[in-house]
Amino acid sequence: MIPYFPAEGGQYRPSLGLKVLQPADWIEIDSNFAAEIAEKKHLLDVNRNGVFLALPDSEAGQAELIETLSAHLLAHHADRYSPTSEGLRVAATGETVQPDPARPLTAAASLVQEDVLLLQPSPEGHRLVAGLLGFPTRWRLADKMGKALAGIHEPVPGYADRLSRQMDRLFAGLTPDRLLWRLNFSLLDDPALHQPGGHNDPNAGRGLNADNIGDELWFRVERQTLRLLPKTETTVFTVRIHQARLRDVVTTPERARDLAAAIDGMSEGMRRYKSIPGFEAPLKAWLAGVADS
């Protein structure tokens, strides 16, 4: 069972939906820690440029992020991390992590389950300058690197008209003592954590039917946070993935009705963007069965 159900209430609005986050709750750690850390390190080994990219002169922001992250882990997860003369020791893996000065952000792959993206102010707005992205939900780091917020979100239906100005104002108004968070969900026919492609796929889930969709479709939640680092004025965007089979998430009639209503509330463009049309009919049939049970 995953800890979040963003479809609760049955409404889907293209909005930021940000809430204040207590600093102690910035990073989440669960029983999947060791497996996900191993997967990220494997991805760095076999596909470094697909998982980590950084622009020149972003090293100071990367270093401040690792410094801030390490202090947070020692303060709020002291049972899992300990300082040594060589770096930060991770109890779950037995590894001592010492950041590479040339690319400090890569240390995050050994420290936390979250993916970490760094944005910095520019004349065009806040621009993506570095990223450690092991578990993307249908996007590629190389496609976004160096772009400002508007360019990053250009493919998202409704962003330019409804959210672009809000997002620019939000980033400009962030302060170091005020962390924010939000949730987003997707429905995927593949349980892989590393999914760099798949938006607007009309064939997604074509093999699913009302009998197997509960087992074969995955409910995937992105827990996203924003935090401003004071020294370098770098904004940290973290993404933590939670996912489970649909039948293990939609366990009550209320949840079935809420998810069906949330999908109905999406624009046609958003449903296509999330690659829902290929399995929408069997999904709704399955949800209707749970709702009536």
Image (cartoon, helix red, strand yellow):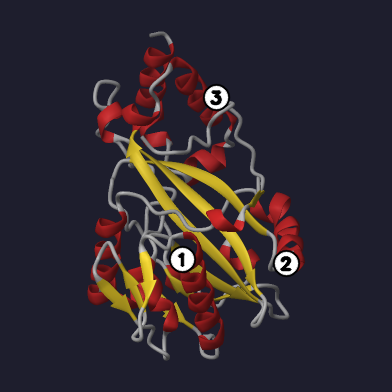
Q: Quadrant of residue 46?
A: bottom left
Residue type, label 2: Thr
Residue 265: % across, % down: 59, 30
Q: Quadrant of residue 276?
A: top left
Structural distance between the alpha carbons of marks 2 and 3: 36 Å
The residue that label 3 is drawn on is 261
Identify the element where label 3 is drawn: helix
In the displayed structure image, the side of residue 88 where residue 259 appears, left or right = right
Structural distance between the alpha carbons of marks 1 and 3: 39 Å
Discs 2, 3 touching: Cβ within 8 Å: no
Dot 3 surroundings within 10 Å: few (below 14), some, or many (20 or more)?
A: some
Q: Of discs 1 and 3, which sits in the foreground?
A: 1
The residue that label 1 is drawn on is 73
Q: Of discs 2 and 3, which sits in the foreground?
A: 2
Residue type, label 3: Ala
Q: Earlier in the sequence, mark 2 or mark 3?
A: 2
Q: Depth check: give the residue in front, 31 or 206.
A: 31
Residue type, label 1: Leu
Q: Earlier in the sequence, mark 1 or mark 3?
A: 1
Dot 2 surroundings within 10 Å: few (below 14), some, or many (20 or more)?
A: some
User: Could you say which disc has been placed on residue 175 in the image?
Assistant: 2
